[in-house]
Each structure stands twice: as structure tokens, then as C-alpha cells.
Amino acid sequence: MSPPQTIALFPLKSVLFPGALLQLKVFEPRYLDLVSRCLRENEPFGVVCLAAGHEVGRNKVSFESEGVLAHIDEVDGEGANLLRVRCHGAERFEIAGAPRQQPDGLWMAEVDLLPADETVSPEPAYFATVQALQQVIASLREQQGKSPFAEPFSLDDAGWVANRWCEILPVPLAARQKLMMLPDPQARLRLVHEYLKGKGVVQ
């Protein structure tokens, strides 16, 4: 395992998955500075799910000990001190020590990167879930006029299919967090398949 690395944390009321798109509106000074530094130094930041507290302000917060690195793809200015930031999720990580908060309110932590999902084909029992995701992609693309997920699509990859479903299923954040952290992509896809089967989405 590689040695821990120090990253800035961006707590959100959401769970970021590897390969997911993330759109942010950034206006707080600490995060405007963070975006500038990440662009300048070509480095990611860590997205962690808030367990308590709010995304903005200097209120007391607590967040999950595992998250996903976010790499910035595009930044657009929108008025004074407001940025629209487009990112994508990459490696999962686990916080290795106690996070510390800087004077400006930005959280920093040492993290250990976790292994990426092994690329494996979905088991035949889950083909209906793969086909249902294809239909969802086509429907969302027609409604929104754009792709709902980052391309290229990897419908032959169990982890990719499971992650995309996990992004859009109406499940609690705690359940979404546990799904994100499952190290076995086939097991993650099995849980998604069972959920969809229980809802009558697939047979």
C-alpha cells in the first residue's frame, strides 16, 4: 500500500462514486481557494458524506471516514465569487488519522487510497439490471438532452453498472455510503439487482 497522502476534504450531503460526475456551485472563500489550488497544482480533493451538520458555514460537522477523490474537469465563473465546477470521481480513500480544520475552515486529512474495483463482467443473473440501466440512460438522455453519466459507458463492467445505479436509486445516504465502500463489485451489483427486483423494475 502506498503511504498516506494529505488532501483537502469537501464534505457534502451526498456520496460520490468512482466514475461519477459531480457538479458544484462554489462560493465560500475556503472552497474558492481550494479550487484555485487544485487547478494550479493539478491535484484532487476528497469528497466525504456529511453525517451531521451543513455544507456551508462554520458550523460543527461530522462526516464519514471514507470518501472518493474528485478531479476537476472544468470551471466556469458565474458572477462575483461564484464558480461552477465540474468534477469526476476517482479513487476511494479511507481517512488515516484525525482530520484537522485550518483557520479558514477547510478540512485536511491524511488518507490511504483503496484499491480500485476489479474489472469483471456482470454475472448472467444480473443481465436484466444491465439492460434496465441502458434503458434509463436512453430515457434520461432524451429528457435532458445530454448524457446522464460520464462517457464512455462500461456496461460490461459490473462495478461501473452498480455504481451508476447507486447514484440514482432513491436509497438513504447511509445505505449509499455502504454500497460505495463494498470492495466486491459483483456483490454491489447483486445488492442493486435485489433492490430493483424487489421494486418490480427487473424480473
Image (cartoon, rainbow, N blue to C red):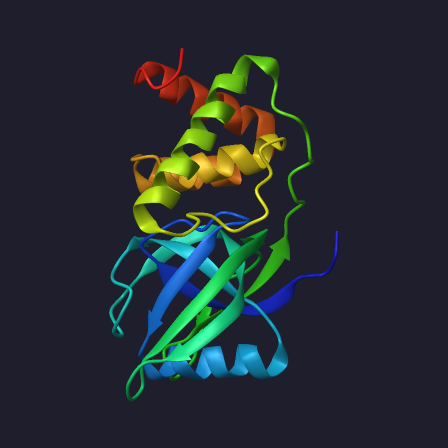
Which residue is more in the foreground, 181 or 75? Answer: 75
Report the side of 11 relative to 179 (left or right): left
Question: What's the residue at 45%, 51% (across, down)?
Answer: 16
Place residue 39 in its image quadrant.
Answer: bottom right
The image shows residue 133, relative to residue 43, as above or below, that is: above
Q: Position of residue 52 (x, y in %)?
A: 27, 54
Report the side of 136 relative to 6 (left or right): left
Which residue is more in the foreground, 2 or 157? Answer: 157
Which residue is more in the foreground, 198 or 107? Answer: 198
Q: Position of residue 93 (x, y in %)?
A: 57, 53
Place residue 201 in its image quadrant.
Answer: top left
Report the side of 29 relative to 59 (left or right): right
Report the side of 53 relative to 183 (left or right): left
The image shows residue 47, relative to residue 30, as above or below, that is: above
Q: Position of residue 99 (x, y in %)?
A: 47, 65
Q: Is residue 178 visible?
A: no
Place residue 183 in its image quadrant.
Answer: top right
Question: What's the residue at 41%, 75% (across, down)?
Answer: 106
